[in-house]
Image (cartoon, rainbow, N blue to C red):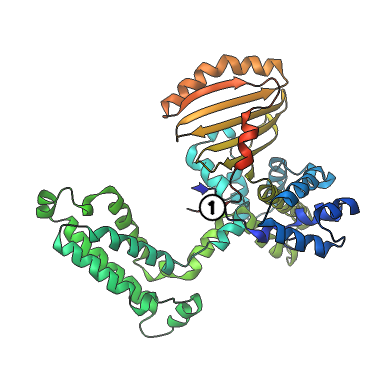
Amino acid sequence: MIKITTNKSLNIVLPNTNRALKEALSSATPKELEQLSQGKDLKSVLDSLLKQSTADNSSDKLLLNLVKNNPTLKSLSNVTPTLKELQSSLQKEPTQTPLTQKVQSFLEGVQDIDEKGLQSKLKDSGVFLESKIKNLQTPQQELKTLLSDLSKALESSNISTVKGVSSDIKQLLESDLFKGVSKNEILQSEKTETPLLERTAQEVKKVITNISQRLDSNVDKTLQANDVLFTKNTKILIDKLPLYSKQEQLQPQVQTKELFSNDIKALLLKAQDELTNSTSTPNKQEILKQVDKLLLQIDYHQLVSQLSNATSLYIPYSWDALEDGNISIKNQKDGRFFTDINLTLKDFGALKLRLGLFENKQLNINLSTDSQELKSLLQESISTLRKQLSSVGIDPKEIRFLEDKRSNYDEATQSLNVGFEVKG
């Protein structure tokens, strides 16, 4: 799922890794640079930004204003046309590539939207790539966490043999298999007679066998039906074990390969390198132009996310009625979530929605539009919307139109958490 956190990923605010920041700073006036830092050279501005970033957000606000008013960056929020142009260029090539398939999947019609699909698209939109890389763990590390959680859960079991399994898992966690082994050490061990990962997979299979015997015991199910072994949470942990029961699944490269095969920014960067060195791509320059533009747009959304205390995303769907659209997700410290959806419709102009979710199911919706025709159409559909929300367990407490385009939402966002990352 997408999880908003308070961790700032400072590597996306460096001009050598974020081209949107570089563009904003390069076009800033000396007076604007002086506002950001006492020094007037680019190096001192960046030093000041990084030092101030953890202390206050005043420089963030100034820089955000520079980014949003930069003439080059102003038109970058609309990613869909770029995706369409890139798709068109890729389709002229005789061979289908992972990038071609990814762009096609992103450009599904908005009528095909569903919760799982939207979650997947947002997660792989490229905006979260640096955070995902930063938090990437080896399968070995993930397995260690899983076994530790399972051992703790089984400790409270009333079945003596299950307590024995918990003890065996603890001993396994204290073995050389889990003593801070690095990726390089794992790869080096694969050259030995009994590779480390093979031995690890064998131990996982033993744990699975021992637990399965207890799960299949009719005596235990009858006499200890309420035991922790048979709870939903324990089952979730047990069901994950087979993911680590094969040597190839424990390879450190597996997760990296999966990450780079799904994230569109990673695919774009890889395609950019391959295309630059290619001598057999007739449409090379046209594709490179669209790839370069899309990478800059993703950098833009990353930078806006960082500076605005939110997660700024483009809408990854094809919709003929839509000219432009983006989403901003904000998390307040008391657990409330707010989402800003800004749309520019071809026939009706701007439509802004502010959604506030409270206590997991209480929803407030504020809408604003300059089009009286659109407002009338939306008002006619409010009762239908209420029924649809209620049918999926969401209570629409308030749905209203804002005449002055402001609400208490604006004030509420002042104390929101900063930063973002993605966790599966």
Give me the residue at 47% from left, 67% from top: 138
Q: Residue 131: which quarter of the image?
A: bottom right
Work out whether 191 lies above or below 144: below
The crowd level at tag 1 (other Cα within 10 Å; few <14, some 14-19, many 20+) is: many
Give me the residue at 74% from left, 67% from top: 277
Work out whether 190 lies above or below 39: below
x, y percentage for residue 59? 75, 52
Q: Does 329 sit left or right of 232 as displayed? A: right
| Most foreground residue, 309 or 129 | 309
x, y percentage for residue 361? 45, 32
- Residue linked to disc 1: 422
Q: Does 365 sit left or right of 187 as displayed? A: right
x, y percentage for residue 319? 64, 33
Q: Find numbered disc 1 in the image and state the secondary structure of the residue it sits on.
A: strand
Give me the residue at 41% from left, 29% from top: 393
Q: Does 214 sit left or right of 378 as displayed? A: left
| Most foreground residue, 405 or 249 | 405
x, y percentage for residue 309? 64, 46
